[in-house]
Image: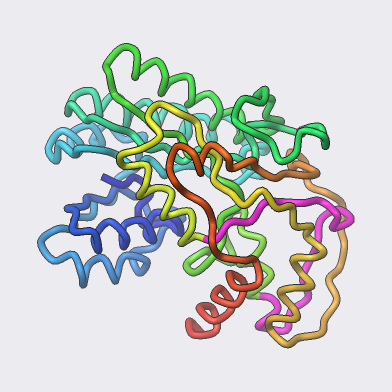
Amino acid sequence: MVTGGAGFIGSNLVDALILEGHHVRVIDNLKTGKLSNLDDARRQGLGRFEFYNIDVTDDEVSVVIKDFEPDMIYHLAAQADVRVSVKDPIYDAKINILGTLNVLNGAVNANVKRIVYAASGGTIYGDVDLKSLPVNESHLKEPVSPYGISKAVVLDYLRSFRHTYNISFVALALANVYGPRQDPYGEAGVIAIFANQVLKGEQSTIYGNGDQTRDFVFVDDAVDAFIKAQTKGDNLLINIGTSIETSVNSLYQVMCEAAGKKQNAVFESPRPGELLRNSLDITRALIQLGWKPWTSIEEGIGETLEYMSNKK
């Protein structure tokens, strides 16, 4: 079962699971996900794919999980916008904490053996001292945004359910995932936003001075980590990124060069709740999952631009 399976990362994961021959049931409320993202899954997964338009906070989630009795649940459904969490932390907590508890309770009732959770490597550690970058999983968790707090709190619930109900888990602390199907008008997708604007010849906005950094990992690489977490990484938090810091200014320059465009961005005040610098130490992923990224930022941006150009 994949919650949030019609979303950007979720739908790419569903495609991979279908290709592996699994029977996949998707839960998504379609608030940010799109049915069109599941077109390939529908075509290729005849008889092995089902979709349910349900919110993870709905009581019906437990019924659907019990009916399906999945061997494992990939839990990706979330409120994933830092800005939204700052504006409305109660709404953020309702989805990311209470929604997750709803899924976990459903897992208990259905005797689910394993949960793979999409945590946030970009927010759960907070503003990390520069000498600690790239940050590893043992670092103190001091998230500064309500979104980061809600994603970090779930880690304790996963440990609790592991202790009480013997449900194993893997929490993948994702860096900034990007690539095909990311919504250029939606949450937290600066590469998709820039790509859409550059292709249209529209001016892009950089918040802050542009020197803030992020760890950008391509969606195919991230999906590979989810697949490997089916059987590895038991009961661990594992960073999934590249260990490379890329500044927003550098990102925009690479984007323009890849698109063959010459246009300047405008700068505005930084947004509350966002970090100055971030990159993830992925040593544990290599050791525990046998995983490492293979797509460079240049290659990934090229694939993203190609996908968005073909969508027009």
* In the depicted structure, whether residue 257 falls above or below residue 155: below
Residue name at image x 46 percent, y 55 percent: 32
Residue at screen point 87% across, 52% down: 269
Q: Which residues are magenta?
A: 197-218
Q: Which residue occupies the foreground of this view, 78 or 53?
A: 78
- Rendered location of residue 306, percent (x, y): 54, 81
Q: Residue furthest bottom?
A: 260
Query: Which residue appears farthest toward the top when viewing the image?
Result: 164
Say how the picture is coloured.
rainbow
Q: Is residue 295 left or right of residue 122?
A: left
Q: Residue at x 76, y 86 (%)?
A: 261
**In front of the other: 310 or 13:** 13
Q: Is residue 115 left or right of residue 293?
A: left
**Above or below: residue 209 compared with residue 103:** below
Residue 174 percent across, percent down from the top left = 54, 45
Q: Is residue 221 left or right of residue 257?
A: left
Q: In the picture provided, is 226 more to the left or to the right than 253? A: left
Location of residue 215 in the rendering, given as x and y in whole percent from the top left corner: 67, 51
Q: Is residue 216 magenta?
A: yes
Residue 198 on the magenta span = yes
